[in-house]
Structure formats: structure tokens, C-alpha cells
Image: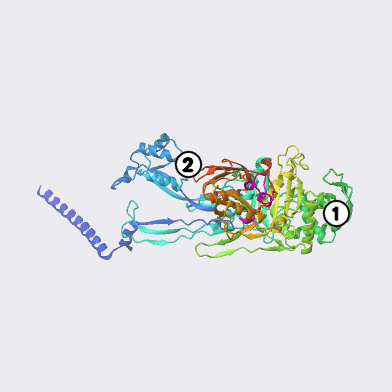
Amino acid sequence: MKKRVGNMRRGALVLFIIFGVIFLSVIGRFFYMQVVGDVNGVPLAAKAAQQHLRSSVIEANRGSILDQKGEVIAKDTASYTLAAVLDPKQSQGTKTPHHVVDKEKTAKVLAKYLSLKEADVLKKLKTKDLFQVEFGKAGKNLSAEVKDKIEAEKLPGLIFTKQAQRFYPNGVFASHLVGYAQQEEGKDGVTKLIGKMGIEKAYNSILTGKNGKINYDADKYGYILPNTKSAVEKAQDGSNIYLTLDKKIQTFLEDTLNTVDAKYNPKNMMAVVMNPKTGEILAMSQRDTFNPTTKEGLSKEWADLPVETTYEPGSVMKIFSLASAIDLGVYNPNAYYQSGTYNVGNIPIHDHNAGVGWGSITYREGVERSSNVAFAKLLAGMGPDKFKTYLQNFGFGKKTGIDLPDEASGKILYDHKIEQVTTVFGQGTTVSMMQMLQGATAIASDGKMKRPYVVSKIVNPNTGETVETKPAVTGQPISATTAKKTREELRNVITGEVGTGKLYAIEGYDIAGKTGTSQIPNPKGGGYMTGNNNYIFSFMGMAPANDPELVMYVTMQQPQLSGSETGGKAVSEVFNPVMKNSLQYLNIKSADTAKLKTATMDSVTGKTPEEVKKELTAKKLVPVVIGNGKKIVQQLPQPGERILEGQRVILMTEGDMTIPDMRDWAKNDVLKVSEITGVPFDVTGSGYVLKQSASAGSVINDKSKITITLATPDKIPNFNKAPVAGESKKDSTDTSVEEATGLNALLN
């Protein structure tokens, strides 16, 4: 028994020694760590700090896309995704809850702001064993306004995640050219905006910024610790891209295309307005199109048609055939030829009037009538090889190099004699709209051909560095003399007695241009489609004809025509209003306005309406008096502003304000009345005033609700197109002058 006790004592002593050694080792280790501050080469202070160190991304803004004058076309905006924290553990040790406490109340409130029923929200909030839940599509892309409203309800457990979203404030606006960007997750797991089409795609790397970051100390819940120090690496925003587009001209184009598309429902339609002196694209659009913010309509057409597609141009190609013949000295406008039919081997080439022709006519008349036979004979005079060289010099068969993705090159179909002949009048050979416009710049600007481009400049917002695009001359296929003679002949297409382009005449302006009606290859194979609608109708025009400032090209495929409607008429409904409005907006004077006198507006306030009417009428201005007082107290235009004969002058008297008869007025004059009275008008439609909600002479005040309905002239009975300044159908307040000459657009 004694021996057993002795063994137990020795065992206890051994254990005591072992535990004592371990205890002393641990104490020694702690003492060493405290003194040295290092464990296995790792500083303990750094390790402790690392537990509290947080890093946050500072998101860079994607660069904005703007028009040439700085009007925003595309920009970043914030959107938010809502989530609800369900785990009660997130509220442990906190004074205020960090999870959803009252699920019924939370569901009721969220149903007011999300497109979800209260029961559906509650079902999500009652999901078991989840840290947090989201609300699907209804909880994503929330605006800052909605986020603020939800936060104002002070519901615990709701958190928001911010994302950048691309916003296109103009809606449908050169949509395929501008393109769109959307959020995508990269290989690194970071979600960011990526350009998917147009400028957004072509310049994605330039538009994309570089994120920054901030490092700071925080507690276990992520709250920044007091007196923390932070290290900031600034974000580098993406560069801003200024386009050559002009917002007003682009808007003219979009509005007009909407109207014509609704009326004729073509399979597709393209239109471009260009400055031929520089190559700048001022406006470009197509139908079908889409809204880049909502993506509505995108599924109908992905391609940027003016850039990415090719087609047979039809008789518009005769512009370049004619210029080539003139440059080679082959074209004699007064020489005669036999129209009707021309045989290429065993294959007859017919004029468009079923090969009947117009007998023996001059080549000038042949150009005016768009005679295929005339151009087939001109080709014979030029020689196919020389003409092909001109085609190549005009840039056909190769890309222009426009600063947009996926440009098509087209093909000069020229292997056989019949192909050579059909090419001269625009069949067989395929082109892109950009090639046609590039070639047109040579005709419009003394033979020097300019590359079309859409980016005016790129500005780095971080450094202020600006890179500007310079106009590029891509060749001189013809001489300046040839260019001038070609324009003169093309002017006859519009003004000539038998010209096919009479529909494209614009009052007060000289237009040079060429119509086109091209056949469409049969998709089922074998020849071309038949039928009244199955063509591509087109027109290319430039103005003023003697020294063009603008070139516009319109194509329309398979419009739905009825009765006596023609494809040319449909195309003219795009070309004429857009070209006219653009010329007036750019203050390019017409032949009529050049004859009108300009003056500086005098002050007429303090005078009686009667004497002011007499004074302004003598100056060939149109006075419009608002009010029934005895003295003029306000006027528009203001004293010192430039005015033109025939312009309206809005005069307001003391006393009650009265509304004038504004029927037939242009929108700008209507807005002057709104401005001078301070009464906001609700203006709907486009064109000129069809009706107004308040009758002429009615007394109005700042609480009045005035609705103005605009319509195109053809919808307005007895539309007053061109009265003489100072005269009217009824009285001086009913006179319309600007509608005929567009003077208002020139002066505003």
C-alpha cells in the first residue's frame, strides 16, 4: 500500500513539472511577444491593425457622350439594388437593430415603392435560414428618389447597393450611332458598364475610367473607428466624347422620321445630314430604331444601317458617273442621243418608262429624266477601265474609315460587260451610305473628298487634355471645275422642266441633287423583286447648289404606298423639312431672305399701341398686341436685337393680358407669347398652330391653363403660307410670315 502511494506521488510530481514547464513556456512566449512585438517574423501591431482595416472602392465615372455644343447624349447615373437583412445576429451588441424586425410593416411600406404586391414582399421577408434577401427585378435599378423615400421610412434592416447605370436623356436619338452600354461582370468578378454598340462600343476603353480606393479602420460591423486614418487613391474618370452631331438637327431628323415611318411603314429607312466641307456628320438615324435607356425596339434591328450594310444605290450613283464623264470631257449636255433602249450584247438596257424613251433628246435632258441609256452611252465614251478608276478614286469598294465599328466595304461588281453598264446607273455594284456621302463631298467642295466622321473631340476630365479630330481629305477624284459643272447639272434635276427631282425643290433655296429607285435582289433567288413597293427609293441633295453647306442623303426601302402615292413623294417628306429646317437653323440664307433687310430692334415701350403698330408696319414688321391697356410696357424682341423684315414683334400693354389668335403660327412665336406673359403653355404636336384652348381676345393670367395643338401644314385648313408683312386674313394678330420663309428659325 505504501508503495502504491509513493508511485502516485511521483506521478503527480511529474505531471506538475510538465504543466509547470508548459505554463512557463506560454508565459515566456507572451512575455517575448510583448517585448519584441513579433511572431514568426510578422509584426503583431500590423496583424491587429489588419483585423480592423477595410478597403472601399471609389467608382470612376464612365465618360459622357455629348453633341458638338456640349448637350448631353449619354451619361452615368446612379441606380440602387434593395436587399433586406433577415439574420437577427446582425443586431447583437448594437443599440439599434440591423435586421428586419417588423416584417409585416416592412412589407406594407415596400409595396408602396416596388412593383410587388404586399403579400409577395412579405413572403420574401419570411424566407427562413437566409442572411438576406433581394426582391428580383422589382428591387433593382431603383432611382435615388425612390431610395431616399424608402430610407425616410426608417425601417431597420434595409440596405442599398449602388450601381452605375447609363442614361440617355434624349430617348431615341441617333441610337445606333451612339449605341448603348450595360452592366457586365468581368473575369475579375467586378461589374462595370461595357459598351455594346456604336460609339459606346468603339470607344469603350476611352470612356471607361479607372476605379480608385480608400483604406480605413472599422469595427466588426463596418463602422469607421474614431480618429481613424485613411489612405485614398483617387478614381480616374473616363474621357468625355464630343460628337459632330448637332442636337437640333438630329431632333429635326428624328421627329420627321417618326412621322414618315408611321405614315409609310417602310421595311427600313436611313438618313444622314453632313457638312461636306469637313466631313462632319451632323445628324444620322434610321428606322427601325430603339431607346438606348429602356432597350425598347432593339430586337428589331441591331445593325447601324448607314455604316454596316450595303445595297444597290440605283440612280443616285449617276452623280458620280456624271462627274466622271464631265472630268474626262465626254459629257456634252447639248449633244443628242436616242433614248429608250441600249443593247449590251444580247441584253437590252431600258429607260425607266418601259424602254419607250423620249425620242432623240439631249444628254442634259437625259440627266434630268434619269435616263439609263444616256449613262450607258456615257460609259462607252469613257471606257469601262477609266470609269472603274474613278469609282475607286471616289472610294467605292473599300471602307471610308469612319470612326464607328463594323463598317461595310461594298463591292464594285465589274467582271462582265453587263455588270460594267449596270454599275454606271447604280445596279449590281453595292455601296454603303458612308461611301456615297464621302463621294458627295468631292462634288460639293471643289473636288476634295472628305472622310465622314462623328467624333469631334475627346476631353480627359482628369487632366483637361483635349484631342480634336481634324477633317481628313481622302482624295481628289475630280477637279474643282468638274465639281462645279456637276452641281449645275444636278441643279437642273430639281429645276428642269422634266427633272425627276421636282418634288425636292425647297422654296427660296437652290438644291442640287439626284433621285434614285433601285431594284431589290429577290431573297428567294433569281433576279429582282417586282411590285410597286419593292424598291429602295432615295435622294441625295446638297444646298445651296452653288456652294453647298449641307449634304443630305435619304433611302427608304419598300414603303407601303397606296393609290397615287410614290416612293419619291415619301422620301421628299423626309428630305424637304429636315434640309429646310437645318439650313434655316444654321442661318444659311435662302435666295428670298438674302433680299430682305435686317435692322436693330428699337425700344417701343411707353408708347401707345396705335403709334407702335403704325411704326412697325412701316418697317415691314408684324406687330402683335397683347392686352387692352393704353401703353406698351414690354416687347419681344428686346431693344438692340437683330430683326428681319416680316418678323413678328410681340407687344404687351398695361392692364389685363389677352391672348392673340395664334392659328398658323410657328412654335417659336407661340413661345414668345408664353415668355412675355409668364403663362406656361402646354404645346403638343409639331409644325404650326392648329388650335388653341383659349379663344383670341380672352383675358389670361398666371393661373390660366393654355393648350396649343400643332400640326403639319397639310392638316391645317386654309393654311396661311405667305402673307405680306403687316397684312392678314383677319387682323394684325393673325398674320403668318415665318411659316413661308422660316425667318423665325433664322433669328432664334
Of labels 1 and 2, the one closer to you: 1
Looking at the rendered image, the quarter that the C terminus falls into is bottom right
Residue topped by disc 2: 137
Measured from the top left, where is residue 519 in percent x and y?
A: 76, 45
Q: CA distance from mark 1 to mark 2?
A: 66 Å
- Please tell me the numbered disc located at residue 363: 1
Q: Label 1, secondary structure: give it.
A: helix
Amino acid type for the residue under numbered disc 1: Tyr
The answer to which of 275 and 401 lies nearer the viewer is 275
Residue at the outermost top position: 119
Q: Label 2, secondary structure: give it.
A: helix
Q: In the rendered image, is residue 306 in sight?
A: no
- Whether residue 8 sits left or right of residue 603 in the image: it is left
Residue interval drawn in magenta: 724-748
Q: Residues within 10 Å of mark 2 (few under 14, many from 20)?
A: few
From what the image shows, is residue 303 above or below residue 473? above
- For residue 726: magenta? yes
Measured from the top left, where is residue 179 in percent x and y?
A: 58, 51
Amino acid type for the residue under numbered disc 2: Lys
